[in-house]
Structures are given as C-alpha cells and as structure tokens.
Image: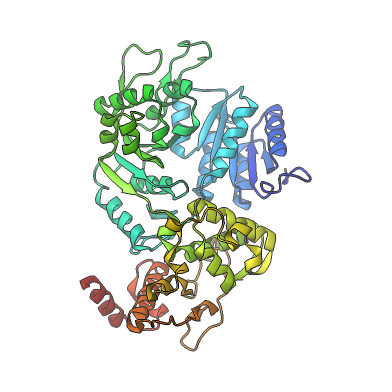
C-alpha cells in the first residue's frame, strides 16, 4: 500500500514514514488509525515477503511488525531486512505469542521494543512517539576506524579533543566488563556512547538492551527489569522475560538511572553483586551474565547526599565514569554537525539546501544549545523543511537563536561571542574540506562547496576576520587553522594518511612529520 497520511495538521510529524506489517486486516487497520491520528505517513504490508520488497525500495523511519505471519520466522525476517537497510531504524514487534524465546529473539535481532496483543492505544502511541524521538545516529568514525558498518563508534560525529578522549577511554575498557556510568546533559548522545562501549567489547555480537528508567511507572519496574511468570498476578497471562534476561550474554543500558525508585535500587544492587535475577512468581533467582552501562543527567553525588540515591549502588555503578560534554563545550564540532544534518534532511525530505550564510553561521555558533545535539538536529530539520532550497539565512533561524534566546546565560556563552581575545576568533573560522567521494549506492548528495580558492580548499565567506584592537598572535592562529584542516582531512579519509595528504595537496611524508610534531608537543 502506498504512503497514507491525514490531510492537514500534525505537520511536524508528517514527514515521518512508518511501515506496518501484519497479516490480520483488523490489526493493520487499528495501527493505521493510530498513525493517521498522530499525523504519520505509513505504508502497509501483509507478509514478510511484501515487507522486504517495500523496505528494499523505500526509506522508513520506523517499522511495526507482527511476529508470526506466514511462518514462525516472519517477524524475524522483517527485523533483519529493516536493520540491514538501516541499523538505526527502530522496529516494534507486536505479537500474541508472548514468550521468552520470541522476545529474546526479537530483541537480539535488533528490535527496539515489543508489545503484546491485545495492546492499548495509549501504549502503542507512546512506544511509537518515544522510538521516533530517539536521536538518529549517523556517525563520523574516529580516525583510524574501518568502514561505517564495522565501526563501533558509528553514530558519533565529532573530532573535538573532548570526544577523542572518550574514544580512547572506550577503547581502553573494551576488554573488560566494568560497570560504566555515563553522565551529561540531556541530548548529548549518552546512548550512542553506551552502544559504542557495547560494540567494542567481547559482548558486541550479543544483545544491547536499552531501558529508559524515567519512562517506566514505579509499579512496573520490577516486572520490566526482572520479568514474571504466568499467573503471578492478575494480568500475567503469559511468561514474560525481564530486560536482564533478554540482555543475557550482552549489555543492558539503564538510561536515566537517577530516576530509579529507591525500592528498586536495592534490588538492582543485589543483581550487580550476585549476578542473579529473580522473576516475579519464581521461588529462586536465576543467573544472568550481563554488563551494566548506566546513564543520567542528574548529579548522583548530590542525590546521594540528599538520600535520594543509594551510596552503595552509586559506587557499584561508578567503576568507570565518562562525562559526555555539552555541545557548547565542543564548539568546533557544531558546523560539522550542521553540515551532516543538512545532508541527511536534504536526502530524507527531498530538499536542496546548498549552504549557510555567514550571519546564520555566527548565530548558530553563538547560541548556547541547552538541548544539545538533539536540539540542533531538530532545529536543522525544521529549517531544511521550511526553507526547501538555497542558502539558509539569519531570518530562517528560530527567533531564540537569532536573538541568543532566554536560555543563554553568562556561564553558557561560548568564547566565540567574546571577540576581544585572539583565541575567541578560532571558532568563527568556517572552512570545510571538499567532501570525500560518496559511495554511489547510499551516500546522500553532498552540500555544494563554497567558492574555491586556487589552492583547492573550499573557504566560506566567514573566513573574513576583524583584527582586535590589541592585535592577534598570527602564528598561533595559523597553527589552529592548519591543525583543524588536518583533523578534517583525517576524518574524511578515515585515518588513511596518504588520502588525507591528497586532500591537503601536500606530500605524505610532510603530513607524517606534521603529525609526529603534534604528537611530540
């Protein structure tokens, strides 16, 4: 069935495309009704074979599939087809055959979530909306990594020193099962780094099971995390595995761990200590082999001091602590992220944004981004959709970004705003390497380069500088430009020095010497 959507309303959601796969007409119609109500576009299929054809020829933001259709493995076939086309596509499995084996198979194959028939409309709506609000990782690999499909850091864009330090930590702990705590503001990409920790470990081929502790009602925490047996309470109509059972052999990601109720904290502590989980209705606990990765935007030390978080659990979780920097703390990555999101939304929304004006770039660099990468992505998506084509100008940006916004506080203002110091000029130097040749099969069309100089480096008009009254250290500034361009070349060439040297139009041995010199410094 071709794309369907409601006419008028819900314009913010109307570009989201969802594939519905179910052999029961009544179930498909019920799901389609929910999608129309929510303003999503959708296509439908009644078999795994039909779904595979649609997935192969279209790009979907989400797939909703029955587990058993023409055969017992039909749902599994749909999951694998969706993940093979795009590993970041959330797949929701809906099934009347709730059992441990089916749930584990679905989650380990890459399903985002599963719900049982008969399902409530509220549960379906919340699951769909939550899945589509997740950050869409489309990552730039760290230098030296392999192809994107084999890159454990897939989804993470950036070359700021703070991000590279995190890459180093993740690689260092890859051969351990150490419990890891990720902290940082909302929207900084903590789940992406959790996935990187999982992928680099010996558990990388096993399940990665994310759990949003802030989205589960307190009364359901134990059932969700540890599971239950049929008949153990009124609504327990079948055995249901907990998230720890589904993650057995792999990793469980406890997002927003700071929202975990105190009554559950002691039970989680016991799991970490004893490596056993007891389902509701079971007389005895059963062993589980799970690596625990947790994340929070809360200050857990402060929560411990207030008695809101157990001190012993905090120390159990905080064996390895990784702080994810806010976007305003890594300004050198902002323009790279903007270019990436423009390419992505040009392709997904059939737009043709070609560049961003100097004034718009300055506003985007000066804004504090309290919502971090998630806010930046949503902002660029809105701008691309509404602008449609051509150059993004200052007036195309939301008012709060043009004016600095009420969210901008003195502690959040980036150095780029304070133009009185030479170092503050560096974030305003906007230059990009010519885009690396994309693969013919999958890469979106690149953003056309700005006017090109005789040396072949695409330089935007933002390279015009105003000399401060107190002067500038020219040597330092030139070194900053050179190092940044080298980093961009290495990122585009995935760490291949000879390719990076060609992009910079310099001899390979010269580049190697520059890199050795930097390493020595």
Question: Considering only vertical position in the picture, is 356 above or below 235?
Answer: below
Q: Position of residue 356 (x, y in %)?
A: 59, 70
At a point 32% along the width and 48% down the height, the residue shown is 322
Q: Position of residue 287 (x, y in %)?
A: 29, 24
At a point 34% along the width and 76% down the height, the residue shown is 498
Where residue 241 sits, quadrant-wise, is top left
Foreground of the two, 32 or 166: 166
Which quarter of the rendering shows the N terminus?
A: top right
475 displayed left or right of 516 = right
Foreground of the two, 253 or 430: 430
Which quarter of the rendering shows the C terminus?
A: bottom left
Where residue 203 sits, quadrant-wise, is top left
318 displayed left or right of 409 = left
Of all residues, the one furthest to the bottom in this rendering is 454
Question: Considering only vertical position in the picture, is 345 above or below 192?
Answer: below
Q: How many numbered marks appear?
A: 0
Q: Position of residue 476 (x, y in %)?
A: 33, 79
At a point 56% along the width and 82% down the height, the residue shown is 451
At a point 61% along the width and 56% down the height, the residue shown is 381
Tell me if residue 204 can be seen: no
Foreground of the two, 46 or 252: 252
321 displayed left or right of 224 = left
Q: Position of residue 422 (x, y in %)?
A: 39, 76
Of all residues, the one furthest to the left in this rendering is 520
Q: How is the image coloured?
A: rainbow
Tell me if residue 6 can be seen: yes
Where residue 440 sits, quadrant-wise, is bottom right
């Amino acid at each position: 069935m071709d794309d369907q959507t409601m006419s008028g309303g819900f314009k913010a959601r109307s570009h989201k495309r969802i594939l519905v796969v179910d052999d029961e007409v009544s179930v498909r119609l019920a799901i389609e009704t929910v999608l129309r109500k929510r303003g999503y576009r959708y296509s439908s299929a009644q078999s795994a074979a039909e779904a595979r054809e649609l997935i192969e020829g279209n790009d979907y933001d989400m797939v909703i599939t029955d587990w058993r259709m023409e055969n017992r493995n039909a749902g599994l076939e749909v999951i694998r087809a969706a993940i093979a086309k795009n590993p970041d596509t959330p797949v929701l499995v809906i099934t009347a055959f709730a059992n441990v084996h089916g749930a584990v198979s679905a989650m380990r194959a890459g399903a985002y979530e599963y719900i049982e028939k008969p399902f409530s409309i509220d549960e379906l709506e919340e699951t769909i909306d939550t899945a589509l609000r997740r950050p869409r990782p489309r990552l730039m690999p760290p230098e030296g990594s392999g192809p994107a499909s084999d890159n454990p850091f897939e989804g993470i864009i950036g070359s700021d020193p703070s991000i590279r330090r995190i890459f180093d930590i993740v690689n260092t702990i890859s051969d351990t099962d150490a419990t890891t705590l990720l902290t940082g503001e909302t929207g900084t990409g903590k789940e992406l780094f959790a996935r990187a920790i999982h992928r680099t470990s010996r558990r990388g081929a096993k399940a990665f099971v994310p759990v949003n502790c802030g989205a589960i009602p307190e009364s359901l925490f134990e059932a969700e995390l540890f599971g239950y047996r049929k008949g153990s309470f009124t609504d327990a109509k079948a055995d249901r595995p907990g998230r720890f059972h589904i993650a057995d052999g792999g990793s469980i990601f406890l997002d927003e761990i700071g929202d975990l109720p105190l009554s559950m904290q002691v039970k989680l502590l016991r799991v970490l200590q004893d490596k056993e989980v007891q389902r509701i209705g079971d007389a005895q606990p059963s062993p589980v082999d799970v690596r625990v990765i947790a994340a929070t935007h809360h200050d857990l030390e402060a929560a411990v001091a207030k008695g809101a978080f157990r001190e012993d659990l905090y120390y159990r979780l905080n064996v390895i602590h990784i702080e994810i920097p806010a976007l305003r703390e890594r300004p050198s990555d902002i323009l790279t992220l903007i270019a990436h999101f423009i390419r992505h939304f040009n392709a997904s929304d059939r737009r043709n944004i070609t560049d961003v004006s100097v004034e718009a770039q300055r506003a985007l660099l000066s804004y504090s981004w309290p919502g971090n990468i998630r806010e930046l992505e949503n902002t660029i998506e809105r701008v691309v959709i509404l602008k449609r084509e051509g150059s993004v100008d200052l007036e195309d940006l939301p008012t709060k970004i043009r004016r600095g916004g009420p969210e901008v506080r003195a502690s959040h203002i980036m150095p780029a705003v304070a133009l009185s110091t030479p170092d503050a000029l560096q974030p305003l130097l906007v230059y990009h390497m010519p885009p690396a040749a994309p693969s013919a099969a999958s890469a979106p069309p690149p953003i056309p380069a700005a006017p090109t100089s005789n040396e072949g480096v695409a330089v935007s008009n933002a390279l015009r500088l105003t000399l401060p009254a107190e002067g500038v250290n020219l040597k330092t500034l030139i070194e900053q430009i050179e190092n940044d361009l080298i980093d961009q070349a290495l990122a585009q060439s995935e760490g291949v020095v000879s390719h990076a040297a060609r992009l910079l139009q310099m001899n390979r041995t010269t580049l190697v010497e520059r890199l050795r010199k930097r390493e020595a410094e």
